Image (tube, coloured by chain):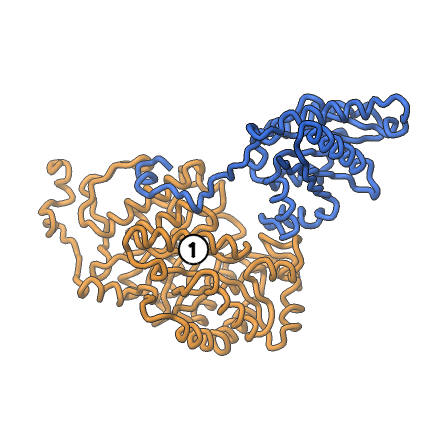
Chain colours: A orange, B blue
Amino acid sequence: MQFGIFTVGDVTTDPTTGRTPTEHERIKATVAIAKKAEEVGLDVFATGEHHNPPFIASAPTTTLAYIGAQTERIILSTATTLITTTDPVLIAENYAKLQHLTDGRVDLVMGRGNTGPVYPWFGKDIRQGIPLAIENYALLRRLWREDVVNWEGKFRTPLQGFTSTPRPLDGVPPFVWHGSIRSPEIAEQAAYYGDGFFANHIFWPASHTQRMVNLYRRRFEHYGHGAADQAIVGLGGQAFMRKNSQDAVREFRPYFDNAPVYGHGPSLEDFAEMTPLTVGSPQQVIERTLGFREYVGDYQRQLFLMDHAGLPLKTVLEQLDILGEEVVPVLRKEFAALKPAHVPDAPTHASLVAAAAGGKDSTVYAEADSATGSRAEDAGAVR
Amino acid sequence: MTYTVAVVSAGLSQPSSTRLLADRLAEAVRAQVKEAGGEVLVEVVELRPLAHALADNLVTGFPPPELEAAIAAVTSADALVAVTPVFTASYAGLFKTFFDVLDKDALAGKPTLVAATAGTARHSLVLEHALRPLFSYLRAVVVPTAVFAATEDFGDTTSGQLQERIDRAAGELAALLAPSTVRRAPAPDPFEEVTPFEELLRGNG
């Protein structure tokens, strides 16, 4: 099982000091957090994508490449990549490039985004959210799997004899998860392709997660990718820990009370009961997290949100120490003991290469494409 | 046949004249249905104790358990009696908030009786100008008679005019409660009846 963290990159005032970090500070803090995640033994760092204040989460592949250059082992992922408003050609190029630069330490979680106004910023229409997610992803898959693509759809200009470069590392595209809080269509999409399904699993009651994961598992089996309990499931989670649970509650409460999304609403205690948020001792986080598999089954990836709501960098790094030293080692052992042998691990670049019976260089040279014999510049003539 | 009637009351004082009117309407509906050979199970949803939960729902996007139960009671009822005090020339904010957090299809086709209370009869058209459009938007079937009770109506114990309106409205609601018209089939569950992906790929989402 993989453990890691995910961030939305919010620039939020620290309610205990009234100080708001600059974009520069928050961007640098994100890098420090990612490096710390590797240092304390986590497996995954994932960044969200937003294109508006108060977030610094635009240009995710720039962030991930910079982090990739300063880390050795950690998988770089997204939570989520906006498949609706980002040109699939750019996604294909950017993440294939990231694969090469980081020797395959890349996967992605596709999402539609939750900010309505973002659609027109990129020339899209929010009313087409689901159809955009479906068409764009179908094209992205082809761009990574076919050297030369002729394509026509509803939402972007047609492609004729187009080769997306670089080709995926070792001829193996990055593994893809699909994330959605409550759209059955997205669980269906993940199941259809045999991709992973990532449930945000924060800020909402676990019943939402359970419904989505159950649907995904059932349809994964329907489409013949394996038994329902072999589907690839990832969960989010949210925790704040101190040695004594009362200290954790006291320290986190002002951040909770003023947090974006849920602040100024329910009490911390009520919210912790209604959603997967855990504020307490490391032992409480371990117990709560182990309980997740009771309603989603054996799953492959657990990401925690640790750095939002204005928590200072120092506190976040302390939280990562606790997570890496006291929580994750226990969870690894316990989850491994519970998991039946036929339930697979989350795919990695190495496992995907092995499944493809070895990697192959898939460079497309300008002269002619090895598969079709056509050259990009000849595409018009070939047609 | 037994019909469930959800009675939503948005009165804030205790005791409240809004709840008083709601109870009289519920009783009248029960009597009229009984006359026609049916039974009524009344489920009262008082919004005042849900005020905090409603505000939380606005902030978080999901209902706390006690509000979830109230929403389920209204959504699954065979008919609805909705009663609000008039605040600043319209329904009370608490009343509107409850209907704001309902699913937009929750009241579709549901026989509904609307009623309001106020200090003066000068507010009586609030029923026609505010409540009726709200429930039309939600595609509820609102009975023609809406019941307005001003303070003076509660004082008038001799003319019987308020009781007459209550009985007329209750009769209209009871007339819509028949085995053939009550919508009992649960709404399709999108997590059970999923659109196959080939359909979505063809753009038929």
Q: Is residue A15 above or below residue A243?
A: above
Return the residue nearer the eye: B85 or A179.
B85
At label 1, the amino acid type is Val
- Taking the image as shown, residue A146 lies to the left or right of residue B188, namely left
Q: Is residue B149 above or below residue B196?
A: above
- Taking the image as shown, residue A214 lies to the left or right of residue A307, namely left
Residue sitting at x 48%, y 78%: A325
What is the quadrant of residue A107 in the picture? bottom left
Chain bearing tag 1 is A
Residue under circle 1? A213
Secondary structure category for the residue under label 1 = helix
Residue sitting at x 20%, y 47%: A163
Return the residue nearer the eye: B59 or B23.
B23
What is the quadrant of residue B112 in the picture? top right
Identify the residue at the far front of this view: B37
Measured from the top left, where is residue A65 in percent x and y? Answer: 35, 61
Measured from the top left, where is residue A273 in percent x and y? Answer: 61, 61
Measured from the top left, where is residue A134 in percent x and y? Answer: 34, 43
Measured from the top left, where is residue B31 in percent x and y? Answer: 74, 31
Quadrant where the N terminus of chain B sits is top right
Residue sitting at x 50%, y 73%: A323
Residue A225 visible in rendering: yes
- Taking the image as shown, residue B159 lies to the left or right of residue A35, namely right
- Taking the image as shown, residue B177 lies to the left or right of residue B9, namely left
Quadrant where the C terminus of chain B sits is top left
Q: Is residue B76 above or below residue B115?
A: below
Residue A85 visible in rendering: no
Give the class, few, some or many, for how many residues have Cα within 10 Å of label 1's Cα (few <14, many ≥20): many
